[in-house]
Amino acid sequence: MQQQYHIPVLLDEVIEGLNIRPDGTYVDCTFGGGGHSRAILSKLSAKGRLVAFDQDDDARKNLPDDERLIFISHNFRHLQRFLRLQQITTVDGIMADLGVSSHQFDEAERGFSTRFNAELDMRMDKRQTVTAFDVVNTYTEQRLHKLFEQYGEVTNAKTLAKTIVQVRNTASLKTVDGFKNAVREIVKGNPNKYFAQVFQALRIEVNDELGALEEMLQQVPTLLKPGGRIAIITFHSLEDRLVKNFFRRGSFDEPEENPFINTETVNELKVITKKPVQPSEKEMKQNPRSRSAKLRVAEKIMMV
């Protein structure tokens, strides 16, 4: 079942990057099919502990029967709060795989994929109220333009936003096919690639993915013990840039080019992966969805 739900990406590289202490406490921020969690558990002793987060309650079906595992059905942006509820203040390692699970793409009714006709939903956490349909049906043209441009790097984001606002009073955008048909006239280039970028932008907006990632990263220096590590797998440049900048500089800002302005921040992390680790040819062949994955690892340093 776990293999069908989601194939873990860069599994060996994540485990190596975490440099697991057998008696340690670890966090898997994105449990999903449980592949990374199982590999972490296999390296832990009877004293070791793993806390697994997943806001998608479907992931609960994949939980192994292991008393060392605590499952928390919430977004990882609430990491510190839920760890404290378990009387955990510091941990030895944290990992996150930021990709949408294969299960979510393949479950037609979730509305994540352009391949199936379903309601335009895209909520990772079904408890939240805002769906992708709400976004395309209520956002202003300016707001739609910005999200398609920033989150999807859609080439004609302005035209797309204008078209959505024009057609939404007469055409139903409630389903995947309804939405695609309503904007088909203005699609640029390969339609599959175009809609993949559009859907990525909507998914990021609906789930506030970048906001959640920023909040989680800001909690990491406090949570990690000295020598503890964080390993994060990203799948697009927006996520990767946030992770790279935070690991290198302790902030999300790009480095200031003006030599007279000092923007140095205190950084408690040391980068372990000078360049992001990417899947091997073999892995990409076995799991094509891994092809855009990038793994970055950092370690908490002892502050003097």
Image (cartoon, rainbow, N blue to C red):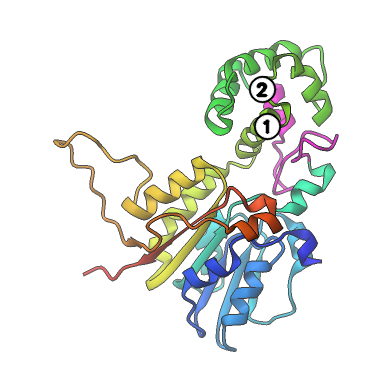
Q: Quadrant of the N terminus?
A: bottom right
Q: Which residue is mark 2?
A: 189
Q: Position of residue 90 (x, y in %)?
A: 44, 72
Q: Quadrant of the C terminus?
A: bottom left
Q: Amino acid at mark 1?
A: Lys
* Residue span colored magenta: 111-137
Q: Amino acid at mark 2?
A: Gly
**Is residue 238 one of those drawn in magenta?**
no
Q: Residue at x 59, y 70 (%)?
A: 51
Secondary-structure class at tag 2? loop
Q: CA distance from mark 1 to mark 2?
A: 8 Å
* CB contact under 8 Å: marks 1 and 2: yes
- SS majority, magenta: loop
Q: How many residues crowd around disc 1 within 10 Å: few (fewer than 14), some, or many (20 or more)? A: some
Q: Position of residue 212 (x, y in %)?
A: 54, 48
**Is residue 116 one of those drawn in magenta?**
yes
Q: Residue at x 51, y 45 (%)?
A: 239
Q: Position of residue 123 (x, y in %)?
A: 71, 43
Q: Residue at x 78, y 18 (%)?
A: 182
Q: Quadrant of residue 226?
A: bottom left
Secondary-structure class at tag 1? helix
Q: Which residue occupies the foreground of this view, 234 or 126?
A: 234
Q: Quadrant of residue 184?
A: top right
Q: Which residue occupies the foreground of this view, 184 or 162?
A: 184
Q: Residue at x 49, y 54 (%)?
A: 216
User: Is 112 left, or right, of 53 in this rendering?
Assistant: right
Tag of residue 59: none
Q: Which residue is mark 1?
A: 193
